[in-house]
């Protein structure tokens, strides 16, 4: 009757009920009464998406989860919720773990959480979804299913009399309300952030890794947040949605989770920490072994690149999928613009697109960088930053402030900020020009950086884990570029990077230099005082950096005095940063002082 055996064939009624286990094409040979008038018909049957196997599902809460989920320390079951921290007691930290290890070579998990802030914000810490092999389930001495920590680590780590200890052999996605350093965030908003953390880090005076505020997600809102994590064996993708406002955020991290945890099996669960008394609740949770087939990544026509005039850009994706796209530097979600037809690109912009289809895993995000300018116009061309919000992303204390790109200001000390062009650029040969202005310059200084910092690492010396355009060194005392965050800290900076520094040296220095990987200078820093150039003058300083493939040359000119300083370094930039393309931008740090450090203009061309 058919070219392949099916289950559930109803031959007497003339209808077919099939339950294939794979996506297949079948040929039916239909024969009329008496064996006459046969006809061949080919049909395609879409199989149920069975590549992800459900392990457990708590869609209506955890009333029946006792014995399957173990709450530890301050965590407890509270009605249908898992209450990681609660009202009634301060400085709480709790963990809740599924009581059998799970396969984490690939997985899909969905959960919802709600943080109900007190009136004493912003001293709340936050929660994590955590995968860990700190120790076995049989050891209840602050390890295994009991792994938790002090409030200052958002419950992520272990707490002992000797102090806060990182949770080794672990990976966590953090939803962070405070970062333990409110001064690194502009006073106009709350430090709602997310990030991928490895082995309990980072620690110390932190800054937001991935700022959620531009996506209009406020972890202080009290709204229920829905999270979906999909791991395909090499890439962890997260979508976060405010279920009340429908605001959404998407990001991805390349990461080898089994390598970090030390096994293909690990404990999975949640941690939470707070300083004032604040309920932090997990409301629902499911977990699948594996993930559904991923939708093919969208493609673009016209091809990304430089054009002298307006282009009509089409986005191509599988016919049954829906495509969403952005032009604001944020990864697209289902709340972004829906693709309905060719997009008119009349000025330089970056289009990011994702294809979504029910029953499938969302596609990878496709990125297309279009430069619309007359021939020989720079790829990056900001005479000021008034209209730069879709092409420049800022982190920490940095923000677009009118016509300037401001890295730090004089409102607070211990500030650190970074700003990056949203798409990688070619760094094999280039010329970049920018104008700096450092006023009230009593702080550490700033840098121009080229970087491809790994988005995740199991190296215990790299406690700050970031990547792509959001990379930001984890300390204010290293010009935002190194990891110098105080006594006892690890001085890891931006790996796979080079930076030309403009070092105020706590109000007394006047230095430049070429640094690699966050902290290693090529040669030594160079004092520009003898050339008549003064970084503390407050004058606009015009900088040109040119690279011919071997020699990097920096020329700095004081635009008021016309004093000039030039220096060159021999370096293989693609080899240092790990690719022919990389992210480019600026970092700034103030240490214990203050300074307004800003970029007034910026061009970049190959």
Image (tube, rainbow, N blue to C red):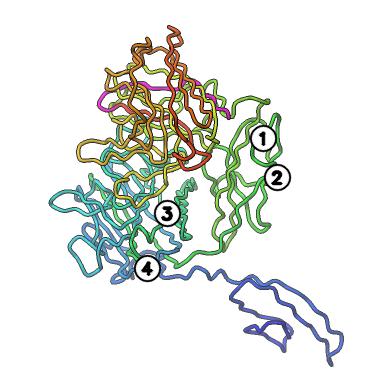
User: Distance between the Cα atoms at labels 4 and 3?
Assistant: 18 Å
Mark 3 lies on a secondary structure that is loop
Task: Estimate how packed mark 3 is, as few (under 14), some (14 to 19) or many (20 or more) residues with alpha carbons within 10 Å.
Answer: many
Of labels 2 and 4, earlier in sequence is: 4
Relative vertical location of residue 8 with respect to residue 422 in this rendering, above or below = below
Q: Position of residue 146 (x, y in %)?
A: 23, 62
User: Distance between the Cα atoms at labels 2 and 4?
Assistant: 43 Å
Mark 2 lies on a secondary structure that is loop
- Region in magenta: 591-606
Mark 4 lies on a secondary structure that is strand
User: Distance between the Cα atoms at labels 4 and 1?
Assistant: 47 Å
Task: Please report contact status of discs 3 and 1: CB closer than 8 Å, yes or no.
Answer: no
Identify residue for label 1.
Answer: 345
Task: Estimate how packed mark 1 is, as few (under 14), some (14 to 19) or many (20 or more) residues with alpha carbons within 10 Å.
Answer: some
Of labels 4 and 3, earlier in sequence is: 4
Q: Residue furthest right?
A: 37
Task: Please report contact status of discs 4 and 1: CB closer than 8 Å, yes or no.
Answer: no
Q: Position of residue 173 (x, y in %)?
A: 37, 52
Mark 1 lies on a secondary structure that is strand
Residue 99 or residue 368, whichever sits in front = 368
- Disc number for residue 255: 3
Looking at the rendering, in which quadrant would you find the C terminus?
top right
> Is residue 453 found inside the magenta-colored segment of the image?
no
Q: Name which quarter of the figure residue 98 lies in.
A: bottom left
Identify residue for label 4.
Answer: 102
- Disc number for residue 341: 2
Of labels 2 and 3, earlier in sequence is: 3
Relative vertical location of residue 402 with respect to residue 518 in this rendering, above or below = above
> Is residue 593 found inside the magenta-colored segment of the image?
yes
């Amino acid at each position: 009757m058919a070219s392949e055996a099916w289950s559930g064939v109803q031959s007497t009624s003339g209808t077919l009920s099939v339950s294939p286990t794979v996506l297949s094409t079948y040929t039916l040979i239909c024969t009329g009464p008496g064996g006459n008038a046969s006809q061949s018909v080919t049909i395609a049957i879409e199989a149920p998406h069975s590549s992800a196997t459900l392990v457990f599902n708590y869609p209506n809460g955890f009333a029946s989860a006792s014995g399957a989920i173990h709450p530890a320390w301050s965590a407890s079951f509270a009605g249908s919720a898992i209450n990681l921290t609660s009202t009634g007691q301060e400085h709480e930290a709790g963990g809740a773990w599924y009581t059998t290890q799970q396969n984490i070579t690939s997985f899909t998990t969905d959960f919802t959480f709600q943080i109900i802030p007190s009136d004493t914000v912003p001293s709340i810490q936050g929660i994590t979804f955590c995968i860990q092999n700190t120790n076995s389930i049989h050891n209840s001495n602050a390890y295994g299913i009991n792994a938790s920590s002090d409030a200052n680590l958002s419950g992520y780590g272990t707490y002992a009399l000797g102090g806060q200890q990182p949770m080794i052999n672990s990976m966590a996605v953090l939803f962070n309300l405070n970062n333990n350093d409110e001064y690194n965030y502009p006073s106009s908003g709350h430090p709602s952030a997310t990030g991928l953390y490895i082995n309990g880090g980072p620690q110390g005076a932190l800054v937001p890794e991935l700022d959620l505020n531009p996506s209009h997600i406020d972890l202080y809102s009290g709204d229920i947040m829905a999270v979906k994590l999909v791991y395909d064996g090499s890439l962890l993708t997260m979508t976060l949605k405010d279920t009340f406002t429908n605001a959404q955020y998407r990001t991805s991290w390349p990461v080898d989770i089994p390598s970090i945890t030390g096994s293909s099996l690990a404990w999975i669960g949640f941690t939470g920490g707070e300083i004032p008394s604040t309920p932090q609740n997990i409301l629902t949770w499911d977990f699948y072994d594996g993930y559904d087939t991923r939708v093919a990544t969208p493609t673009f026509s016209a091809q990304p690149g430089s054009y002298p005039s307006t282009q009509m850009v089409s986005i191509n994706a599988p016919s049954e999928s829906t495509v969403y796209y952005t032009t604001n530097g944020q990864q697209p979600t289902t709340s972004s613009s829906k693709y309905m037809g060719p997009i008119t690109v009349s000025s330089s912009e970056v289009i990011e697109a994702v294809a979504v289809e029910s029953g499938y895993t969302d596609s990878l995000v496709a990125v297309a960088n279009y430069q619309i300018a007359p021939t020989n116009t720079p790829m990056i061309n900001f005479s000021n930053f008034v209209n730069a919000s879709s092409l420049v992303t800022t982190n920490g204390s940095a923000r677009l402030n009118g016509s300037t790109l401001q890295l730090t200001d004089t409102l607070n000390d211990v500030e650190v900020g970074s700003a990056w062009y949203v798409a990688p650029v070619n760094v094999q040969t280039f010329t970049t020009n920018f104008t700096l202005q450092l006023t009230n310059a009593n702080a550490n200084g700033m840098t121009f950086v080229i970087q491809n910092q790994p988005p995740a690492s199991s190296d215990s010396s790299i406690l700050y884990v970031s990547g792509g355009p959001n990379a930001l060194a984890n300390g204010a005392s290293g010009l935002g570029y190194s990891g110098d965050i105080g006594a006892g800290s690890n001085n890891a900076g931006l790996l796979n990077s080079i930076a030309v520094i403009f070092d105020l040296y706590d109000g007394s220095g006047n230095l430049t230099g070429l640094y690699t990987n966050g902290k290693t200078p090529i040669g030594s820093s160079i004092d520009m005082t003898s050339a008549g150039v003064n970084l503390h003058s407050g004058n606009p300083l015009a900088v040109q950096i040119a690279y011919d493939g071997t020699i990097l040359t920096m020329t700095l000119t004081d635009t008021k005095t016309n004093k000039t300083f030039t220096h060159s370094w021999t370096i293989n930039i693609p080899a240092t940063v790990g690719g022919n393309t990389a992210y480019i931008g600026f970092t700034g740090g103030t240490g214990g002082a203050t300074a307004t450090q800003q970029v007034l203009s910026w061009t970049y061309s190959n």
